Image (tube, rainbow, N blue to C red):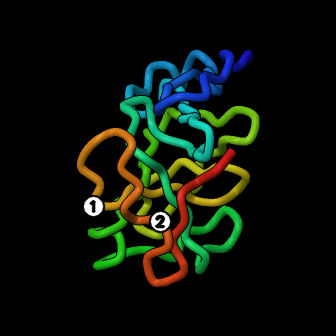
């Protein structure tokens, strides 16, 4: 698992981790991506969309459901997804599975529309971009 060299200009997407064969079949989480610039280092999904963490979550447990999950869709995993390294799969209260990084559940923000958007960072002081 080798990181590509950082490029100090504009956002550049480089591979951070490749998952075990079973996870590679999961098109939602074929790899986690690290986005780099001179001042920004965040985690995104394979499509380049920013991932977030929620301060009110507990390690390995999501506390965002219902209306919260409509604005902050969980980064869902499949039933056959397997974590690797710092990436794990947790069980949500509704029976679905969700990706977590360092035991922190990962989410998207419904207002982010394109790669590199980080409009959810700091929302209500409890939502933050996920950082490696």
Q: Nearer the viewer, residue 54 or 74?
A: 54
Distance (Cα) linking label 2 and label 1: 12 Å
User: Whole-percent x and y of residue 42?
Assistant: 57, 45
Q: Left or right? Give the position of 132 relative to 93.
A: right
Would residue 19 be visible to someone looking at this image?
Answer: no
For mark 2, does the 10 Å Cα neighbourhood hold few (<14), some (14 to 19), or many (20 or more) residues?
some
Quadrant of the frame with the N terminus: top right
Q: Left or right? Give the position of 40 relative to 44.
A: right
Which residue lies under the disc numbered 1?
Answer: 110
For mark 1, does the 10 Å Cα neighbourhood hold few (<14), some (14 to 19), or many (20 or more) residues?
few
Q: Which mark is residue 127?
A: none
Would residue 102 be visible to someone looking at this image?
Answer: yes
| First in residue order: circle 2 vs circle 1 | 1
Q: Left or right? Give the position of 128 relative to 70.
A: right
Which residue lies under the disc numbered 2?
Answer: 121
Q: Secondary structure at mark 1?
A: loop
> Looking at the picture, does residue 122 appear above or below residue 115?
below
Figure disc tally = 2
Q: Residue at x 55, y 43 (%)?
A: 43
Q: Nearer the viewer, residue 96 or 42?
A: 42
User: Whole-percent x and y of residue 34?
Assistant: 58, 34
Q: Nearer the viewer, residue 124 or 98?
A: 124
């Amino acid at each position: 698992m080798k990181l590509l060299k950082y490029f100090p200009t504009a956002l550049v997407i480089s591979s951070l981790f490749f998952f075990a064969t079973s996870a590679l079949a999961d098109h939602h989480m074929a790899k986690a991506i690290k986005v780099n610039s001179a001042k920004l280092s965040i985690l995104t999904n394979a499509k380049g969309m920013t991932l977030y963490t929620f301060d009110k979550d507990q390690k390995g447990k999501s506390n965002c459901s219902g209306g919260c999950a409509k604005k902050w869709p969980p980064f869902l995993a499949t039933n056959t997804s397997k974590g690797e390294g710092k990436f794990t799969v947790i069980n949500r209260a509704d029976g679905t599975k969700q990706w977590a990084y360092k035991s922190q559940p990962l989410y998207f923000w419904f207002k982010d529309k394109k790669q590199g958007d980080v409009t959810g960072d700091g929302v209500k002081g409890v939502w933050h971009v996920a950082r490696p």
